[in-house]
Each structure stands twice: as structure tokens, then as C-alpha cells.
Image (spheres, coloured by chain):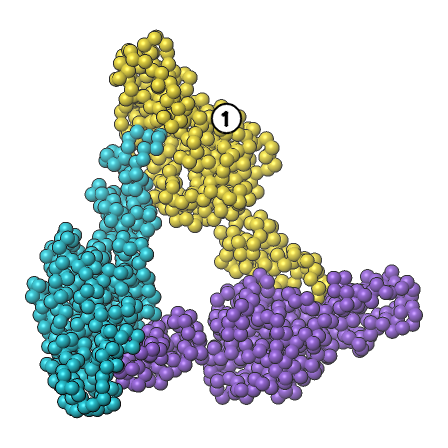
Chain colours: A purple, B yellow, C cyan
Amino acid sequence: MIGSATNTVIGEEIYSFASKIFPICRSLTGSGVRHTLQEINNLGIDLKIYKVPSGTKVYDWQVPDEWNISDAFIIDPAGEKILDFQDSNLHVVGYSEPIDAELSLVELLPHLHSLPERPAAVPYVTSYYERRWGFCLTENQKKKLKPGTYRAVIKSTLEPGEMNYGEVLIQGRSSKEIFLSTYICHPSMANNEVSGPAVLAFIAKTLQEFKEDLNFSYRIVFIPETIGAIAYVSRNLKVLQERVIAGLNVTCVGDDRAYSYLPSRAGDTLADRALKTVLPHFDKKYKHYTFLQRGSDERQYCAPGVDLPVCSFMRSKYGEYPEYHTSDDNLQLISANGLRDSFLVVQKWMQVLERNAIYQAKILCEPQLGKRGLYSTLGGQETGDSLGKKLTDVFTYADGRKDLIEVSEIIGLSFDETAMLAQMLEEQHIIEELER
Amino acid sequence: MIGSATNTVIGEEIYSFASKIFPICRSLTGSGVRHTLQEINNLGIDLKIYKVPSGTKVYDWQVPDEWNISDAFIIDPAGEKILDFQDSNLHVVGYSEPIDAELSLVELLPHLHSLPERPAAVPYVTSYYERRWGFCLTENQKKKLKPGTYRAVIKSTLEPGEMNYGEVLIQGRSSKEIFLSTYICHPSMANNEVSGPAVLAFIAKTLQEFKEDLNFSYRIVFIPETIGAIAYVSRNLKVLQERVIAGLNVTCVGDDRAYSYLPSRAGDTLADRALKTVLPHFDKKYKHYTFLQRGSDERQYCAPGVDLPVCSFMRSKYGEYPEYHTSDDNLQLISANGLRDSFLVVQKWMQVLERNAIYQAKILCEPQLGKRGLYSTLGGQETGDSLGKKLTDVFTYADGRKDLIEVSEIIGLSFDETAMLAQMLEEQHIIEELER
Amino acid sequence: MIGSATNTVIGEEIYSFASKIFPICRSLTGSGVRHTLQEINNLGIDLKIYKVPSGTKVYDWQVPDEWNISDAFIIDPAGEKILDFQDSNLHVVGYSEPIDAELSLVELLPHLHSLPERPAAVPYVTSYYERRWGFCLTENQKKKLKPGTYRAVIKSTLEPGEMNYGEVLIQGRSSKEIFLSTYICHPSMANNEVSGPAVLAFIAKTLQEFKEDLNFSYRIVFIPETIGAIAYVSRNLKVLQERVIAGLNVTCVGDDRAYSYLPSRAGDTLADRALKTVLPHFDKKYKHYTFLQRGSDERQYCAPGVDLPVCSFMRSKYGEYPEYHTSDDNLQLISANGLRDSFLVVQKWMQVLERNAIYQAKILCEPQLGKRGLYSTLGGQETGDSLGKKLTDVFTYADGRKDLIEVSEIIGLSFDETAMLAQMLEEQHIIEELER
């Protein structure tokens, strides 16, 4: 099976990697994305990095120009440098066009973004599809700005180039695929979104280590959100629809305040069923959102006509936690434990998919478990022989139609115990697995 | 779409028409039915009036002889004329055979019908299929009758003739039909039943005015209850089964004490779904009866083998309100407001059917609403951009299978808003309507 | 229909027969089984007695050697004969191999079985598939045993022979079969299990008496539990799958403390639906077990690939009542009333199956019940004409798809009343029964 007992250190490793990629200034396009993909590759993952030229039409969309930025700041009337890009890349509105101009405070204000309801945090703002420039700052800072002449400088380029994404395909015995997706277009915010790339990078690493054991093939993508997912779907739709049996959108998986599930549009695909099997083992009261509350790349994967079996796993869901899309979503918000448990959820979800199967009885009527040493030979009194009872329960529902997820729900045992019992029965030639 | 802003006066117009046809002595057959149909025609409706000869076999039934009545009364022992048909046609048992006889009170009593539990009201009694004669009176009147010789006079005829019904077919673009039915066989009672014919007459009038805008064709029938419906079905079964996509039985729609729904036998036809979409806008706690509580012509339309998609709309349902089938069901019981709101329910039900459609996405993945001015181009922060969110919700369920009624239920918006959003998406060539 | 008004005496007759077969020492095999089957035959039932040779392979199992026993006892150190088989056949572990040996108390103890939690009862213990010998006694007796030399004597034989079961097939008009099964392998215990064979013997007797009236054929088997059912299925699988439309496993039907139902694996077969129709008439709060709580021959009949529509009827279910599998399950635990009411449940279940049918309307629209004298001819007022209303309800659901069980649930009448109404409509040529 996938994975080993590295639980004690895996959280620290993921956290350390998250910290490393946290400072990089990512956006839909640009060197920050390539830098991040390179860091993932440096973990030993055979990530293939793809380029989509600016201007490429992808369905209803067009890939924007490439954005790069080297510096940005404002000089206040007192000659002080404020809102320095070198301090935090959140200070600049994403995709800001270059500027170097002197403005009065009144002229500057429309270009400043702050959050009155969270006055100590710098908000995260972008303008991908309309040319703008702007700075972000705390409400407290903004209130202290005095009238006078300001100089606003953004040293950015917005030119034809490329959009990049990374993909790794880990080949298992079957060409049927499990699909995992996260996004690498957010600048320095931790839960949303260095956590997703960090966790999936280590998932990819683990899968590569254990690839001899894999039943299914695994396709893991690190893409810019929305336009990246749309470009990816447009390039791979046919193969995705043919091969993917279950997919997971992984985002906001670094904090430890909640476990959250957002279904696929269809709502009860294999991906959904497996995640609903896994999550209660981590949190009996995990949060169950509806597809109407969607907001990440499941919007593309589950669009009508795309119809991939993809649901989403999150800890504190985007848009639902107070630090979301602000400078407060920092490395203190996420933790090694949070990342580790998210890693374990994804790992367990894959294990359920790997082990899930449909079994069929090979004999008619009940098997004689006693002669195999699996049932007491002394009859008449209750013997608390729960193993024998459980084995006959699994046998009884091995009807060639129900998979182990369904059988485990019917007989009220965990998926793992149900799979273990099925394996015992299979080793005794009492049931057999149907071709997947 | 169907209908205009005549809401303020339409109630008064319907009430005025109801008052006009109230005094007519209707029964299964006879001149009163023809008179009523003529009055409907006088509204400017191209009602076609059909004749079914007495004695015609219709399935398990036979059309009875035609009944006409010119006068009826009783002369009491004191020589006073009482129970005068000229005062109220309810005084005579419907289909009474002619009589002119002197009887003692003891002989007369079996021919008198009153309501001990509602002592001030004259009951409505009929005997269509067994020859009888009788008078109806209040319990209070009955108690005052003194012994002596009475003369009972009924000047009626019961002879081979015809049964009549009216039908209007308003042609829309599609030959698929919406079916509306009410009955015109009740004498002077207001809610049950001048309200149904009055409301449907004005529905027919409105449909005729707006017929250029109609997607579907409309078939509206004014028929005698039970035997009329059976005769109508027997003459039109094939065409009804081929064309009718939804039907409504309209009865007891004049008072304003309740909104009531009685399902089709199947229970979830398009007719039912549309009415269940409409009624909550008028009354969140509308009454939901079961098909076991049926009692009007849905009994025929939903009979096994007939199986038309017809449900019933009522205000206070027949058999459920205290004045039912008595002289207390008079013009004070119904109101212009009650009739107007019933008109609006039927109109809205037709509008839902007209607008309901199945849409299919024309593009893969989400549409870029920003470039169409339908979504904020400034990203990162919640913008309360509910229009954009709602549009993507409607888009997302445009899967070529769900109709707008279902989509509106899934996304939690009203049918009208959902239809408006679908229209915006269609105008933007993002979704398209499937052939109906 | 099946059965007559013998209710007052039938309970006494069944109890008397149960008392007669109670003392016989039954096991999976041996003369006790044959003796019991012979007693059933002596009631006038044409039971056919089958032999399955020892060693026969039946699916995953093998028929064990035949076990017979003539005597068994222990001589205690004081020379007293204790645990005498002649007192109770429960004193010997079922299938004990022969022994005649002197042992110290320490050597003897591993061969002694008692129930600390029910110290005054002798437990029922067997060892069919592993050679052992042993005695059963009360915990109180065991505590009084003193050190010393004991002589243990079991005069049994365990030799190739045969396993027996009885079957009776009562031919009705249709070759479709109703299947009834109970088991005859338990020694002297009353509820579990002389009650099942006693009740089914009288069911068989009654069916034979009324066989001219039977729509379906009836197959009733008296078999050793588990291995007997498996052997039976292995010999008859094809015919059972082709013919059996509903089956009932009858066990623990002698006491009067509860009515219990355990579903088939499928859960909603005709057998289940009929039993769920019947039981509320006996006990509105009857116990509804799940298939996970199974423990009798439904385990074989509902095994994957066997898939027979068989559910179970019990009073106090095996494993659920305190006297289960001990000497306290004696003739005082069961009663004539308990056995009679169980007989009536089975009889009623068969009656429901016999009468259940799918009807189709022969006329379109509602029938005119008035002309047939089935509906008041005086209209207009509520007449409390519940017969007419009920008849139209049954008519209305005579759609050629719903059987009477389903119709009775929809219209809220008992199955019997629904069937009676359907019969009235059929006699009037208004509905007709579809070919079963």
C-alpha cells in the first residue's frame, strides 16, 4: 500500500517546505510560478512543467500576458518609503501595470485597498483581466496617511510570455487514474495557498516511492487557479474523462481548525464516497459544504460537459476563515500537525480507492469457516465469535455488485476492517475480486 | 408572456361576470348550461359549443335525458306559496321529474331535504340517475310546517335532448397543449361553482389577447362535472394523451380563505411541479391534499388508462368549507380579490410552463463573465457579486437534463429569477435551450 | 381460501403434538430425526423422507457421520449416577464420541459445560465437526462436585450413515411455489425447536385439507439446520429459483412474548412485504430485526447466488430470550395460545400471498357504481357513502402495475378489505386480474 510510518516527521517536512515557498511572489503567470514548480521538483518529483503562451484561447477564456515584478513602493510626503514590495508582496495589487508617478493623496486613494473590518491586515487583491495598478495596506496605515505629494513606483512588466503549470503522472498497474489538483498562483499566504502545493508535493513524493504497489495511476497537477484549470482541462479533457475514476481538489489544508468536504456536482461519485468514508476517522463532525458553496477548481472539473468525478478537501475552507486572503494568513496560521493530518487524509483517501473492490462469492450457501479455523467448532452457546460473524457478513454481501465502501456501510464496520476481512476470505478462495 | 398589468381591475371584472351567471339554473343538461356557455362566449371568447345526444354511451355511463324547468313551488295548507323556484333554484332537487299533486305533510316529508346541522341554509341536492322529485328548504322552515294538505308543483321536462359543453383551443407555436378544465353544471352557488367558469373565462380571454406570444397551445373546457368530463375524455382521449403536457382542474376559486392543491394520481407530473412552484408565492402554507381526497374531474383525467397529467387548484376545497353545497355559498362568500388572486395563480402557473425549459451549456468550463461586464474584474476580496454567482449557478446546472423548475429548486432561487438568469446567459450565447 | 375456524382447538392440538416430539433426542443425524419425521407423517401428512449419505459434499461442506446414542451418565466418587441421559438428553454434548473411562475431577472438568450466569439451567452444547465428548450440567451441580474418581460413560456411535430431511409438496393450480422451512435437529427444547416443526406440521395438514382451493403450490421442508439447508439447496437450487415466489423460515414460534420479523437479504421481496402486511394485525409493535441479526436457515436461502425471497418469522427470537439453548426452554415456555397465534400468522401470510394480485381497470374513466347499486343515487350532500368511495379508490389504483399489498398501503385500508373490494369490482367486470 501507499505510504509508511513517517507520520512523526512528515508534518515537519511539509511545514519546512511550505515555509520555503511561502515568500515567493506567485501570480497567474511569471517567474514566481516557475520558481515554485522548480522547488517542488527539487524534492525529487519528476514534475513536467508546461507552457501555455499568452493569448492562447482556452474555451471561453484567453491566457493573459505574463506578469513579472521586481520592486514596488510608495514614497510618502515626508520622503519615507512605505508599502514596500520587499517587505510583503501583498502590498501590490496582483497584475499591477508599471507606474512611476507623483500623485496627491486624493489621487492616490482610489489605488489603495484596505480592510476596515480587519484594520491590522493587508488584503490580497488582483486585477488579472483589467489593467490597473494599486497598493494594499492596513486600514490603520491608511488612516495615518497625510495630505501631500506621494510617489508611487511599481516596477512590473506585463508582456506576452507564458502561463506555466506542473504535472506528474505516476504509473500504477492500471491505466485508470486518480487525479489530484492544487494551485500555485497565490503570493505569500500560507493556508491559501502554500498548504495545498506543499501537501500534494509530499503526496507525489510518497507515491513515487511506493509506485510498485499502486493499482491505479496518479495524476497530480499544480496549476494557476481558474485560468490554469481551464487551460489544463482544454488540453486534457478526453484523457481525463476516459481515465479518471476519482479526483480531489486540495486547497487550504494547513490549519487545524476544521476538516471540510465540498462535494462534486454529481454529489455521489467514487471520489465523494471515498472521502466521506475517510473524514469521520479524523473528525466525526467534519464540515459538509454543498456544491453551491464551491469556489475553487472543482468549478471547472465539475462544469457541465466536463463532469469529472472531483470533490474538494479542505481544512478551514477559503472564504470561511477570518484571515482568508489577508496578510494574517501567514506561517503562524498553519502548522506541522495541520499539514500532517491533511497529508494523512489524502493518503487514506487514496488507500480506500486502492483497496476498494467488488467481490463475488465463489461458493453457494455459507462457507464452512470452522474447518478453516475461522469459527468455533463448539456449537450451541454464544461464543463471542465476532471474527466468524464478521467474515460471514462480508461474505454475505459479496454479491458481485456492492463495493467494499458500500459493504462496510451496510455491515457497520470500518472500511479497513471490511477490506481486511475480504482479504481473508479471498485468501481462503471463498470470494473473488471482480475485474476493476 | 401571457397577461398584462390588469390586476387592479381584473378582479372586479371577474366578480361582475360571476354575478351575471350566478342566477342561471344550471344542471347536467338543459337551457341553463347553454345560457351559461353563451354568456362566456359573449365575453369575446371563441367557445365552440358541443352537443352529446341523450342516451349516448360514454364508457361505463350513459348521457341522461335533458332536464329543463320553468317553475316549481309548494302551496301550504294556508294557501301560501312556499319554496318558490323563482326565489332560488336550490329549492328544487336537481333533475326532479314533473309533479303536480296534493299530499299530506307525512306524504310530503320524504320529498323534503334540509340540513339539521346548518338550520338556516337550503341544501343542494340532485338525483341525476334515478327518477325522483323533491324540494330543499332550511331546517328552520321545515320545523314550522304544519299538518294539512300541501300542493307540490314542479314544471319540469325530462326528455331526450342533449348534453352541452364548451371548448376553446388557443393555438400557440407548439402543438403541445396546456389543458384547463372547469364545470358548469351547478345552479346558484358561487364558490362551487360560478368561480371556476368565471376565472377560466377571463383566462381564455387573456390568452386570446396574447396568443401571438404563446409557446404552447391552450385547451380550455367548460363541461358538466363527471358525465361531461367522461363524455369529453371519450371523444378526445387520443389527442389529449398525445398533446397535453400539463393540465389543471380549476374549481372553488372564488373565496379568499385558503389556497389548495390536490395532486394528479401520478403526483409529480409537470402540472404538479409547476403548481407547487407557484403556490408558495401566494401562500407559504397552502393546503396540500392527497389524491385520496379527490372529488372533481381529476377523477376522470387521472383514471387508470386515461392517465393525463392533471392536478387541481382550489381556494377553499369542495367538501371542506361549511357553506359547501348550500345556499350560503352565495355571492357574499366570494370576492373580487379572491377571484383575482385565483386568476393570478392560474396565469402564473401557465407562465411557469411557458418559460420552463431545459438548457445546455454551450461552452466547456465556466464562462468568463468579467469580459461581458457580468462579474467584477477586481479579484481577491468578496465583492458581494451575487449576480455573477447566481449566473454561474444557473450555468453550472445547465446540463441538458434539468429543467428550470428543478434548477431553481437546487440553487434556491425563485423560478422567475432563475428563468431571468437563464435568459441572460442565453443572450450571451453561454447556454442554449434544448428543443421542447 | 386456506384454513377454517378451528382456531379454538388448533392451539391445543399443536401443543399436544409439540409435547409428543419434545422428548425425542434429535441431532443433525440419527434415529431421533427419523423418529420426529415419522411423527409428523403420522399426522396424515405425505412427508417424503430423504437420505443424504454421510460424507456427501454439499458446496463448501461435507455431511458428517451419523450419530446415535443409547445411554450416557457419570458415576460420581460416591457411586451415584449423575447427569443421566435418561433424565435429559441435554446432559450430553451433541455428537459426543463414545467413552467409558475413569477420570479424576481435574481431568473431567474440561469435558463439563455449565452456565455461570444461569446457574440452575443445563446448557445445550454440540460439536458436530470436531470429535469431542462432554457433559452439560447446571452451574449449581458443578460447584458441588467433589474431588475423586469419576466414571464417564457415553454409549454413542459415530459412523457412516445418512442425514435425513422431510419434504412435502402440496400442489395448487399454479406451479409457482410458496416455500416454508423449519428445522428438526434440536433435542429437548421447546421454543427452539419443537415449535417450528409443530406449527408447520399443522400448516401442512391444513394445506392438504384445503388443497383444492390453492392458487399456489406449497413446499414445506423439515430439515437439520445449516448443513441440512445447505444439502437441500444443493439438491434443489434450480427448481427453487424458478418456482419460489415467497418463502418463510419458521423458528421459535411457541412462546407468546413477542412477534419478530427478520428480513430477507434483499429486504423487500414479496415474502417480506406480505409478512409486514400481516404482523401489525397481531402486534402493532412487532420486532423488526435486520438481516445482520440473522442466525437460522435464511443464511443459506439468502446467500449470494442463492438469493431466494425468504424472510423469517419468530416469536421470541433465538439468541434473544434468556432461556435460549438451555433446559429452561421447556414445555412451560411455550403455550397453546402462543403456538396457535403463530399458526395464524403463517396462515394469514399465505392467505395474503394467495389473494394478492395485480388488477387492471377494464373501463376508462370512473365506473358508474350507482347503476350497480354500489353508490347513492342522491347527489349533492355527503352521504357517508364510504363503500362507494373505497371502491373507486381500489379502482383508481388498478393500473396494471400495483399489487393489492401496495394498493392497500396507498389507500390506507387493510389488505383483507382491499382484496374484498377488488373482488366486488371484479365480479362487476370493472377490473380484471392480470395473469400471475
Residue B6 placed where, x, y %?
A: 60, 34
Residue B427, position as x, y percentages in the image: 62, 54
Which x, y percent locates residue A367? 28, 79
Please tell me which residue is depicted at 54% across the width and 53% down the height of the picture: B408
- Crowding at dot 1, Cα within 10 Å, few <14 / some 14-19 / many 20+, comes out as few
Identify the residue at horizontal 54%, vertical 77% (top origin).
A345
Can I make out residue C368 in this image? Answer: no
The residue nearer to you, when weighing A259 against C279, is C279
- The chain carrying label 1 is B
Q: Position of residue C93 (x, y in %)?
A: 20, 81
For residue C99, what is the image quadrant? bottom left
Reply above or below: C9 against A194: above
- Looking at the rendered structure, the secondary structure element under dot 1 is loop
A288 is higher (above) or lower (below) than A374:
above
Q: Is residue C179 left or right of residue A143?
A: left
| Amino acid tagged 1 | Gln
Q: Residue at x 11, y 81 (%)?
A: C71
> What residue would you read off at disc 1?
B332
On the question of residue A188 being in view, the answer is yes
Front in this rendered view, residue A244 or B88 = B88
The residue sitting at the top extreme is B79
In front here: B302 or C56?
Answer: C56
C121 over C433 or under it: above or below: below
Number of marks in the rendered image: 1
Residue B121 appears left or right of C281: right
Q: At 33% from the left edge and 79% from the top edge, which residue is drawn?
A: A385
Quadrant where the C terminus of chain C is found in the figure: bottom left
